[in-house]
Amino acid sequence: MMSGLITETIAVAGLSRAAKICVDRWGIPHISADTQDDLFFAQGFNAARDRLWQIDLWRKRGLGRLAADFGPGYLAQDHASRLFLFRGDMAAEWTSYAPDARSICEAFVAGINAYVALTERVPARLPPEFALFGTRPARWNAEDVVRIRSHALVRNATSEVLRANVLRRADARTDLLRRSLDPLVVPELADGIALDDIPLAVLDLFNLATAPVTFESARLAATLDEAQVWRKVTDLGDVVRMVEAEGSNNWVVSGARTATGRPILASDPHRTHAVPSLRYLVHLTMPGFDAIGAGEPVVPGLSFGHNGHTAFGLTIHGADQEDIYVYETHPDDADLYRYRGEWRRFDRVEDAFRVKGVADQRRVLSFSVHGPVLHEDRARCRAVALRSVWFEPGAAAYLGSLLAMRARSVHEFGATLGAWGAPSVNHVCADVSGAIGWFTAGRTPIRSNWKGLLPVPGDGRFEWSGFMPAAELAHSINPAGGFLATANEMNLPADWPQDEKPIAYEWTDNSRAARIQAILETDDAHTVDASCRLQNDVRSRPAERICRVAAMLSPANEDVARGLALLRGWNGDLAAASGAAALFEVWWMLHLRPALLSVLPGDPAVTPLLAPGDIATLVDVLENPDERFGPQPARDRDQLMRKTLAGAMRDCARRLGTEMSAWAWGRLHHGYFQHAASTLMDGGETSKWDVGPLPLGGSQSTVMNTGYRISDFRCNTGASVRLVMDVGAWDNSVCINAPGQSGHPQSPHYGDLAPLWAAGDYVPLLYSRTRIVEATTTVISLVPDLNRRSRKVAHLGT
């Protein structure tokens, strides 16, 4: 162990035997216990130790209990959140994940509650956010882990509503500028429904329920009369941008194509950046189970990593798991809607909401046979509701990991995935025998008579016919090519019977996937270092393609000539030090792309609905201009490109100075992890809770996914963690989290990993006992508190 080792012994009620938390120099806890209940108890205790403010806020947001702590400005969000809770059969819910899922979750939340109790005895252990807001952490029930669904990624409700609104004003070809379809089909509106029945307001409750918690001063000071002002807290364009930017990469390379003869597995899930990080690295050890990797701090177990036998990682797969339904309501009684030829009554549930500073409030939650009612138009006699896998047993995010993380081989891993509900994912895996595999997983609705691209009538004609059996979903084991890779692209096999078994039509642009494929195909002696370099690769395939078109332009003026000279010969690498990268991204994102979305639809009213625009479609249109550009498409396209390039040159000069040699993408594009509460004060202690800025390369279209805000180039989505695992030689594995492991602003591990993450560096993912002992800086021994346990038993018996 390291010199200066910090040790602590804590007596806690709820443990049956002693457990240990050894924290290494990078903040990664290695947790060991003698029994399963004690192991997950210790995991919950440790999650609260490092992330108490984060997980407490997550629970209050998900359960619709923010207003009790923060006031009337949060009442509308509470109301929205409660619409999306799981309200089904809890017995079926628990057994959906694993036979011991309930006992695992009970042990996990008992550990959280034990730490909450410790903070009541020792208030100094509370993170400072509780003092800032004058709140206290709440205790958990096991059901809280699984009932909250609104933080997970499922799709495609937002796209259905946007498509309906585009088609109301334009046509299907115009909608492809917003979202490409693969395979290409023409969306058809079902009989009995009109596009006017689906206003954008349908999305208000959905977006509010899935929005992060914000702490504007005006919101915190809102009165009850002002509560509805905060019903719509997120701009629709921002919602779409964030959804489009969230994805992931993963790959697994067979030992036949590595330098060591052992498989290598890499996984870097992309989500919204925050401090603390969405992910948490942890090592869990007990007799018969020894696993390390990453998960979410509110979920027991882990979703990416290895267990000494099998390594595993995941990305989002595009399966369509949502549908929007439109109902005819009774003209004389808005509580009635037509379903299967009869009038059925909406289920109206009146819930009580605690609100800080005022009396409890009561709000009505409305449900149809399909799910929560999102919008009612009584004048038109219409209502709109959502059906989602969220409301089915077994769809709590990542809980399918409770089985998968224990699989001892690739084949066994695949056999566990019938328990995987949401999100829909691409799993890659490898085991110590050398086998590698790819499995798609997730509840995938069977739609026998529609494609899921537009809202449908809720009259009973359009119903799910169950879910596709897990064993029939796309998968591959030990492919001839020697590797498997995914990056949210359309990756169904070429012979997939899409007409008979439609999975989805909306996928992420394939630029990341194509780049990964190209690199791995040419590397027949792959290494861990090579996987690390690939995870940090900043080559933009859209930039390469657009610059090839630009190379044919004739300069119209000096600005265009200088811009073309800078881009000519550039290889498309969006490196932080690159001036060409800075010019390209400013040109593409702030000038050329918006201009395309303005010109191509032909109707300015449609343009806001198309943002941020589909990369694949827009690049294709640039390469193959059509009549939408004007009477002479190629000439008119060139004129648009020259005009916008000149504008980008002037823009860069304003932002970066007139000396082009000083331009650098990293001077604009930066990582910044902003604490939700830091906006409440200018300067002072809370300003220290932000981490950054950190110069970055890349973009949404590079393997190193660093999607950013258009307003200030702040990277707000990308790799939450990165893992590269040497299968069988586990101590060679590496990882990084961002900005750090801890959520406590005073912890040395709050932001210590951010500079390494920004530089593309890694830390060891240590597995062997010897290496862990060498790197340990803190040892926390948890021992049973027999006195407290005795008092608890006596209390329960009275």
Image: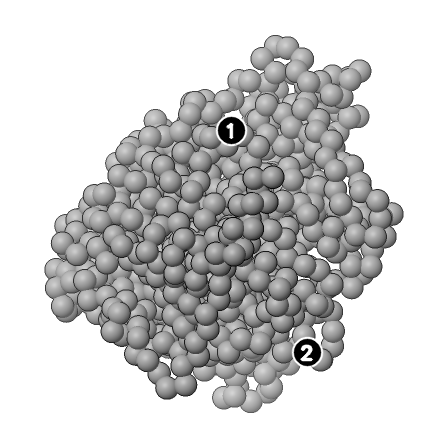
Q: Closer to the camera, 317 or 633?
A: 317
The residue shown at (61%, 10%) is 341
Near-viewer residue (538 or 24)? 24
Which residue is painted at 45% across and 49% down in the image? 107
Asked whether 159 or 595 is in front, the reply is 159
Crowding at mark 2 (Cα within 10 Å: few <14, some 14-19, many 20+): few
> Where residue 89 is drawn, which disc sits there?
1
Q: Nearer the viewer, residue 592 or 61?
A: 61
Residue 691 spot, x, y in % from top left = 56, 75
Which residue is found at the position 25% from the left and 73% from the top? 770
Instruction: Specify the quadrant of the image occupied by residue 760.
Output: bottom left
The type of residue carrying mark 2 is Glu
Q: Is 683 above or below relative to 336? A: below
Q: Is residue 132 left or right of residue 652?
A: right
Q: Secondary structure at mark 1?
A: loop
On the image, the x and y values in percent for residue 628 come to: 55, 49
The reply to whether residue 515 is visible in this rendering is: no
Horizontal relation, residue 680 to residue 764: left or right: right
Q: Residue at x 64, y 10 (%)?
A: 342
- Residue 521, given in percent of the width and then of the height, sits at 21, 61
**Under tag 2, what secondary structure?**
helix
Name the residue beneath numbered marker 2. Answer: 685
Between the C-alphas of marks 2 and 1, the distance is 46 Å
